[in-house]
Amino acid sequence: MPKMNNNDYAIFVDTNILVYANLEHSPFYPVAEQRLNHLSIQGHTLWISRQILREYLATMTRGNIVDRHLLVKTLLDDVHYFSEHFHLAEDSEAVTANLLALMEQIPMGGAQVHDANLIATMQVYGISKLLTHNTKDFERFAGLITVLPLVEFVAPMPLS
């Protein structure tokens, strides 16, 4: 049975954050890297799941994401690093039960099921905050979690 997390400092990290924090040519590289470091320094516990690890590998091995010369060994090293430096939430029967309950409550389909599985995982582990750049993907779960955007929206100043 997973250890429940009652800590307000727990934050679940979405795949896109790990991707951006590990692609130096990404325009979001500096902000993703800084955000993760800052949260860690502040004492937050950063969580990922096995699903996040699989999504990271799938994303990083797409031809249009990384240079073809990127070694698979580098990606494997990344996954080992993540597994050692983040709290790792395991898929379980409880996660699946939560996923099925979410699918009964909230209309969804296709790739949205993957997002719902992240929410189900967060619920089992008692994590209420999600750091992501894809904030729109999680709007349907607004009553269940707090979405922390990678980049905070700042309204433009009115012109005088």
Image (tube, grey):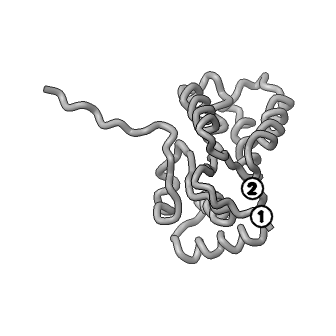
Residue 41 is labelled as: none
- Given residues 26 and 83, the one toward you in this image is 83
- Residue type at tag 1: Pro
Q: Does residue 138 appear anywhere in the picture? A: yes
Name the quarter where the C terminus is drawn. Answer: top left
Residue under label 2 = 89
Q: Position of residue 49 (x, y in %)?
A: 73, 52
Give how far apart the Cα atoms at labels 1 and 2 are: 8 Å
- Residue type at tag 2: Ala
* Between marks 1 and 2 in the image, the one whose residue lies nearer the viewer: 1
Residue under label 1 = 2
Q: Position of residue 70 (x, y in %)?
A: 78, 25
> Who's the residue at 74% across and 56% down the image?
89
In the structure shown, which secondary structural element does the residue marked by tag 1 occupy? loop
In the structure shown, which secondary structural element does the residue marked by tag 2 occupy? strand
Q: Quadrant of residue 116?
A: bottom right
Position of residue 37 relative to residue 83, above or below, is above
Position of residue 96 relative to residue 153, above or below, is below
> Who's the residue at 59% across and 72% down the image?
103
